[in-house]
Amino acid sequence: MDLTGKRLADNLLRLNDKDVTTCAIQNLTWNRDRHLLLHLLKIKSLRYSLERRDNTGYTPLMAAVNLADLHIAEALLEAKASANVTDETNRSVIQLCALRCPNNRKEICKLLQSHGGRFCHPVFKDAYLGNKATLAQALVSASERKKKAELSTKEKNGETKQRVNGFPPHAKGGPHGAAATAAEAVADEKSHRKLEEVK
């Protein structure tokens, strides 16, 4: 460690202010100063919070994951940083890893899992770890469930979409409405026959 790092550590020990030390840890994380950060985390008499957020809304662990820095993330987790914190949009650290880490994604996700980090849904786990087959199956089944839910919702007239789709166009509540005249219905039937003849 250089002289500046030693001075910083000595001053933090002398001040013994939790907020100042926490701010220093956050800054060292963003600046990727691994050696000094590791030194500070090993000093038992220093008081700091690894759960406090900086002006970006990130804890030091979230910052390390955002930077895809496996070594800093590991050091922070060993210093008892929580692997389950979420950002203001309720994304977990593992989700941030998947969104922000082009490098070391799998390694950081596995590291977070080994320290109690959780995926909030199995689909996210498959997506982050690259399990394409199970991800595709999950997305297809989710799409099918959504379609079934949409088909079972009631229309204004009390019919379900599935039932309405079986009706002729003039009875669906479209431009003709449910009170379509016989002439409009006949005109629709004639245009439908013409289309059939063209085919």
Image (cartoon, helix red, strand yellow):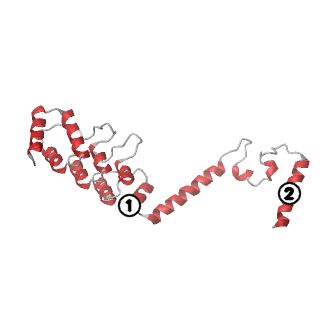
- Which residue occupies 11% across, 40% down? 9
Q: Which residue is mark 1?
A: 129
State which quarter of the image contains the C terminus: bottom right
Rendered location of residue 81, percent (x, y)? 25, 45
Dot 2: within a 10 Å radius of its alpha carbon, few (fewer than 14), some, or many (20 or more) residues?
few
User: What separation in Å lies between label 2 and label 1 (alpha carbons)?
Assistant: 54 Å
Rendered location of residue 130, percent (x, y)? 40, 62
- Which residue occupies 50% across, 62% down? 137
Residue 114 quadrant? bottom left
Q: Which residue is mark 2?
A: 191
Residue 14 quadrant? top left
Above or below, comparing residue 122 to residue 31 in the picture: below
- Between 145 and 58, the residue placed more toward the observer is 58
Above or below, comparing residue 27 to residue 141 in the picture: above
Rendered location of residue 87, percent (x, y)? 37, 42
Amino acid type, label 2: Ser
- Whether residue 90 is visible to the viewer of this picture, yes or no, is yes
Specify whether 111 is left or right of 122: left
- Which numbered tag is attached to residue 163? none
Residue 60 quadrant? top left
- Between 28 and 135, the residue placed more toward the observer is 28
Q: Secondary structure at mark 1?
A: helix
- Which residue occupies 23% across, 41% down? 27
Q: Earlier in the sequence, mark 2 or mark 1?
A: 1
- Between 76 and 122, the residue placed more toward the observer is 76
Specify whether 196 is left or right of 106: right
Q: Secondary structure at mark 2?
A: helix
Amino acid type, label 1: Leu
- Between 187 and 173, the residue placed more toward the observer is 187
